[in-house]
Image (cartoon, coloured by chain):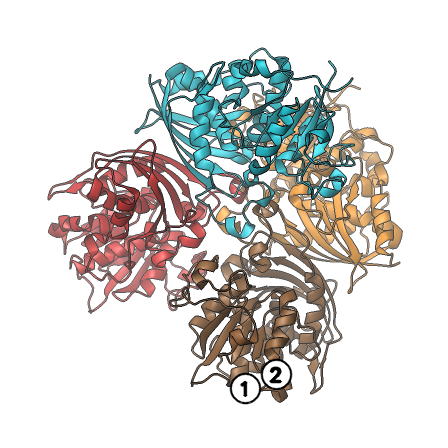
Chain colours: A brown, B orange, C cyan, D red
Amino acid sequence: MRPYHVGIAGATGLVGQRLVARVAEHPWFRLVALGASERSAGGAYGDVTRWMLPAPIPKDVGTLVVSGCTPSDFAGCDLVLSALDAPVAIEVEPALAREGLAVVSNSSALRMDPGVPLLVPEVNGASVVRIAAHARTGFVVTNPNCSVTGLALALAPLDRAFGVRRVVVTTMQAVSGAGLAGPRAIELLDNVIPYIAGEEDKIEVELGKILGTATAERFAPAGIAVSAHCHRVPTLDGHLEAVSVELDRPPTPEQAIAALASFRGDIDGLSLPTAPPFPIVVRREPDRPQPRLDRDCGGGMSAVVGRVRRCPVLTLRFVVLSHNMVRGAAGGAVLNAELLAAKDLLPRRSRA
Amino acid sequence: MRPYHVGIAGATGLVGQRLVARVAEHPWFRLVALGASERSAGGAYGDVTRWMLPAPIPKDVGTLVVSGCTPSDFAGCDLVLSALDAPVAIEVEPALAREGLAVVSNSSALRMDPGVPLLVPEVNGASVVRIAAHARTGFVVTNPNCSVTGLALALAPLDRAFGVRRVVVTTMQAVSGAGLAGPRAIELLDNVIPYIAGEEDKIEVELGKILGTATAERFAPAGIAVSAHCHRVPTLDGHLEAVSVELDRPPTPEQAIAALASFRGDIDGLSLPTAPPFPIVVRREPDRPQPRLDRDCGGGMSAVVGRVRRCPVLTLRFVVLSHNMVRGAAGGAVLNAELLAAKDLLPRRSRA
Amino acid sequence: MRPYHVGIAGATGLVGQRLVARVAEHPWFRLVALGASERSAGGAYGDVTRWMLPAPIPKDVGTLVVSGCTPSDFAGCDLVLSALDAPVAIEVEPALAREGLAVVSNSSALRMDPGVPLLVPEVNGASVVRIAAHARTGFVVTNPNCSVTGLALALAPLDRAFGVRRVVVTTMQAVSGAGLAGPRAIELLDNVIPYIAGEEDKIEVELGKILGTATAERFAPAGIAVSAHCHRVPTLDGHLEAVSVELDRPPTPEQAIAALASFRGDIDGLSLPTAPPFPIVVRREPDRPQPRLDRDCGGGMSAVVGRVRRCPVLTLRFVVLSHNMVRGAAGGAVLNAELLAAKDLLPRRSRA
Amino acid sequence: MRPYHVGIAGATGLVGQRLVARVAEHPWFRLVALGASERSAGGAYGDVTRWMLPAPIPKDVGTLVVSGCTPSDFAGCDLVLSALDAPVAIEVEPALAREGLAVVSNSSALRMDPGVPLLVPEVNGASVVRIAAHARTGFVVTNPNCSVTGLALALAPLDRAFGVRRVVVTTMQAVSGAGLAGPRAIELLDNVIPYIAGEEDKIEVELGKILGTATAERFAPAGIAVSAHCHRVPTLDGHLEAVSVELDRPPTPEQAIAALASFRGDIDGLSLPTAPPFPIVVRREPDRPQPRLDRDCGGGMSAVVGRVRRCPVLTLRFVVLSHNMVRGAAGGAVLNAELLAAKDLLPRRSRA
């Protein structure tokens, strides 16, 4: 298969760096354009980027000249992966789509747009047919907030088997979720900050859209009540979430574990290159998952669930961990792009 | 007033050190005996203790010879403050009480004994009359688990005003709560551990006892459903807890804040020396309380509540912080002792 | 004694907050003016300041209106304590001095000016007569960089007794030393940064000036070779420094300890209010000083020295800890002001 | 080539786990025996081990039954990799060697034995001929302390080119260096511990032996004076060391960098499977190396050197980082084993 030509918008930030690393070694994609803000445009990627990943900048990428994020900057692309900040994305992403590009975005800007898919492939990947009408012209698909993805993965099989009604979730989120402008060390050493601007709202609305239904016309959110309590803790990567959930048909913990562990979801059989062997890995130890030990499970693409037990207030409670920078951001976006490619929904604009 | 003569059982551990520091400078108490395990007995306190507090060992205490924890070791005491581990406390504390000592314990051993008060003075201090029959003979009173005290303080005024029905609480607990044998640095750096052995059970049962009712015969637990999710986070002191609560008579957030901020509780007017000016301090900022910034509020004796807002699943949600080593352990025990003294319930065994 | 009227320039930053807290409760000083940048001027101090200290803003200070930093803003002051950033201080401080104010600065701007004293009172407080000619007109005195003060204190008695020739020092510095704009949590969790811009140069030149000699005309630096290796580590307060020093007359470790522990220096007998009981506290344990356990020694004003032992390469080696925000910044500046007051070198400009 | 049969002694600790992971996927070695203390013997490796690595226990290893560490336990082995604690190793390792086994040890027990090689392959790999006489009978070779390896790598090319005379080194060491029984979180959060028992002595003597000369009879240490200051800092992996060195023939920093970057050492051309592309990687940025960003350089097998600059006291100063658990422990031991295999110095005891 001839690889799709891929541009990355917002390539210099933390998520952008992760996108660069994943696309550079991807079997289906070829990295051809790197877009950033005007401040960086014109410089070599290696010079203008404060590279934060342990592995070095991929070969040949450091010397790529960074462009802006206009449609002409991505003229040679089939697909643009976007890690733009929301205020920029709200302008740039529709503009790119209007020019016929597929935009696969990690930004929050358009997630709740009723015409834009909010995708976690295993959970609602089937709804991607929703954009079939747009295919080969441009469109935008999004992945959820980094604290929503793992939660949606863990709740999806419970919802399918037992019916999710209400959710109380307390997050303990890693600093990488705040990007390069996150909290200062002096704010977070020996501390927890019980607030992340906008995060609780995102969890409460995005979860409903992901677990909702898609028609040809619109996405109808599920009627789920969600209460989120968000915290920033001194971890580097991996959002840990303590969840109590009320279910229509109460299972035993073992029945819940069986539903979680056997979940394959809407991408079963598609052989997407970066899909993990299991979307959900259930741990039986009393003290897992832990961010540092479990965030890289499935290459950072699996949600790890543990401590599944009865809840004395709602029905069931458990802990879920998901790598916020991989499954919750760059890896989630790339998996969305793989889904689109596997369904033959990506335009072919670039020349061979 | 002639000071009460006080012994400390379990004086070398983290809580014991805090007890030593608080009793040594207390206006009503005189420190006369330090008991510890056989391993330490016979040595000078300053030699056998791995002192962990920033302030030095109080003057004249470092040279005190450590004894064991038998009744004869505390023969010169009116009162023994106990920071013994539960398996030891279960034997030692009743033995001391049988000899006529008042035992004010931080241990979990006897907390749920139906004949033993489980006291948070502001919340259920009035129930201390329950032990009037024992006064001047020996008895044991206890304070709750370090993660329960702040929660009980925050829920008490809500319960009195609006009726607490169900509670979902997620704790983010500091390492000092685990004592000197807590998690290794290699286990907790860049990490959160979603499990603390026995902690969730303690929260779920102790809270009901504290918010329950006391008769002459027994303590009847309140009929409250509690779901606790406990986590160890990389903070030194201060347990932070995210709470969703269902109330019989739903208040507005402002009504809840008014109830919290005006709460004085069962010690109003008693002028206990280490009682904080306000048992609950309500913060209005969006990102408070934070463990490092707020744990010392009221000398570590106030619970700090913030982010009071509606809960989309239960009625109300908020965050509460309490200093686990002060209000949640040594300071809570000393406040209990002050309450007993103020109510004239302490035996006078020591000679002038 | 009628208190001196004090203004604080740069009052909203981390050091400025510490100055506010210290002046507000000072027996000799009265806080009358708070100056900051134009962005903050005009607002109430409590509103424009991101207050970071555990203790609350001192009573009556939160409502003070913040001004700019011109001479007229401090017209009612005898003395201005400055925590201004160097690029601002270089303009503002001389301007204030020209108007007759005593400026006691923590800024690096004028430290190496040959006409400006660089004071650590115990070490070179006698040289303060150097400014007698300026007294009652304006002048500037400075305290050294936060990583120099503890080092200078520890080396001063060794220099007096044994003659310091060469010093290799490796610092492990706390994040508060970088102020509110210090490293991000994502940069410093599970990490050490082996570089602090400008810091090594400051140590290497300031140390020589402090240990040098003062004549009526100028400060002559000591002929000491200094090699500094600076690191930022994940601690909140307290700069720890590992030192190897070459001495003219090699002492035994015990002789060195005796010189350190008995040091009182140039303020002996002056009874300065915030001078610590001992400028240097020597610890005998093998693993002290430690930042968290020892930084508050002497109210944060003592340097704590430990591990004094022979050096196989130079003469002697040891570890020294000093609270960078207290002795190394705000506390050092206030102590300098106390020295000036005790020597009657402060102008009396304010009306009674 | 038929793989060598390998046993691991001390397989359940932190270093033992790293050895298991490296041997399990090694092209030249086959893991056939796992020895541990009596407490663990008889259990399945996956059951008795508190596995701490992010990657799971290698396939088929979790079910291996753990044995003791007697010669008969390793009867089927050619080679035993040892991560035993020194008090055990001092007995076990010679016993294994007497039975004809090659013992490649990470333990400190025999490092300074004049008949035992202390190997860093690039630095003194040529001296391995020293054990040729023993080959095909048993022998012990060791790798240095985890804080010595990176230092020895960085100093070797400087010694060869310019002659090392004296070294002052300050270490900032990660908690993994202390194994599973390292400091508690409560000891190390917001803190640095300026002491590691025995570590400074090890650095001072081991470095001399590694940079010394080997004859047929003995290892003669180099006449280098070394002063080590050791610290435990809150990092997980990667020992950072600030070094000042005096050289016989002072180079410019650029000449030193050239010597460091071009160093290949005694294994050049051997194609050892886990040797890094470059034993030393020199960084030019002002603030590198940093533990979290650079410890995995060369798969954790490269020493990363930065900030090479003149020293005002000795000749040259720089910072070096080395992964203490990889190059400084398990990876160093495995590289030693590879060197022995490449030189055909390993016995062939196992049957095909």
Image height check: is A252 above or below B117?
Answer: below
Side (left or right) of D217 relative to D248? left
Image height check: is A291 above or below D207?
Answer: below
- Which badge, 1 or 2, comes first in the chain's sequence? 2
Residue C334 in the image: x percent, y percent?
62, 24
- Can residue A50 be seen here? yes
Residue C184 in the image: x percent, y percent?
55, 50
Q: Quadrant of the image for the N terminus of chain C?
A: top right
Nearer to me, C236 or D102: C236
Residue A247 in the image: x percent, y percent?
72, 72
Amino acid type of the residue that numbered disc 1 sits on in the rendered structure: Lys
Side (left or right) of B292 relative to B344? left
Quarter-of-image position of residue C302: top right
Residue D134 in the image: x percent, y percent?
13, 51
Look at mark 2 in the image and give the residue it sits on.
A128
- Disc 1 on helix, strand or loop? loop
The answer for which chain carries disc 1 is: A
Amino acid type of the residue that numbered disc 2 sits on in the rendered structure: Val
The answer for which chain carries disc 2 is: A
Mark 1 and mark 2: span between their CA atoms? 9 Å
Q: Are marks 1 and 2 in contact (CB under 8 Å)?
A: yes
Quarter-of-image position of residue A206: bottom right
Q: Quadrant of the image for the C terminus of chain C?
A: top right
Classify mark 1: residues with Cα within 10 Å, few (<14), some (14-19) or many (20+): some
Nearer to me, C193 or D285: D285
Look at mark 1 in the image and give the residue it sits on.
A343
Classify mark 2: residues with Cα within 10 Å, few (<14), some (14-19) or many (20+): many
Nearer to me, A294 or B285: B285
